[in-house]
Amino acid sequence: MKTNYQQVLLDLIKTLDYKPTLLLHSCCGPCSTEVINFLIPFFNITVFYYNPNIEPEAEYLKRKNEQLRFLNEFNKTSPNPVAFLDCDYENARFKEVSKGLEQEKEGGARCSKCFYLRLNHTAEVAKHQNFEYFGTTLTVSPHKNSAIINTIGEKIASIHQIKYLYGDFKKNDGYKKSIAYSKLYNLYRQDYCGCLYGKEQNHA
């Protein structure tokens, strides 16, 4: 039976009688908009922008700056501000885990390795800094397999003994809402996921 991960999240929210801390991996500013708006009433959120897959570095920095700009604008009006935790670029780590998978189709084994790399590091940092949960914005995209992402998150949570926040944020028009928020905040929306392998395939 297929798991409705967004319903799993809604069921968790119903049980909360306080706001847990959440280290939220963000893949990009536009995807983070709806996820943050949805979660902010229930969690104390810190955004973790760890995306060593994004190339070239100038593109990585452009997307990171858009993430920061969105958070700055969001925090001007939100009664619950969102924090930001910076990290190193570490593109070499992505190149290492994707070695031999350069020709894989988008959504294949290379992407799963990339998801694992980003979520695992998020969990490591969350555990070290005593966050109660870690999660990701990745599932808001209709191009990402939520079952794969949540299965990876569950596995990593077990390894590091920390809670993973399940979700499928594209549900209930989540992706459409992220587009609307992106227009509202005039955010840059990239035309490829991140790595140059995927970009070359999409623009072939």
Image: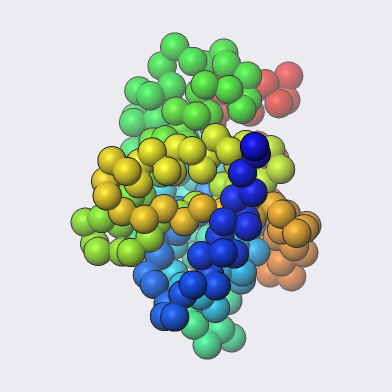
Above or below, comparing residue 158 to residue 65 in the picture: above
The answer to whether residue 71 is left or right of residue 173 is left
Going by the image, does 168 lie left or right of 131?
right
Above-or-below relation of 138 to 165? above
Which quadrant is home to the N terminus?
A: top right
Q: Position of residue 179 (x, y in %)?
A: 75, 58
Q: How many marks?
A: 0
Give coordinates of residue 111: x percent, y percent.
Answer: 53, 29
Does residue 152 appear in this view? yes
| Along the line of sight, the residue nearer the viewer: 77 or 159 | 159
Q: Residue furthest left?
A: 128
Nearer-the-camera pick, 194 or 17? 17
Q: Is 137 positioned to the left or the right of 126 in the image?
A: right
Q: Residue at x 72, y 25 (%)?
A: 203
Residue positioned 52% across, 21% down in the render? 109
Quarter of the rendering occupied by the C terminus: top right
> Residue extending furthest front?
1
Give the quarter of the image for residue 185: bottom right
Question: Who's the residue at 43% across and 22% down the image?
Answer: 98
Seen at 31% across and 64% down, the residue is 131
Residue 138, percent from left and from top: 56, 47
In the rendered view, how is the structure colored? rainbow
Q: Residue 137 at what x, y percent from top left?
A: 55, 53
Residue 48 visible in the picture: no
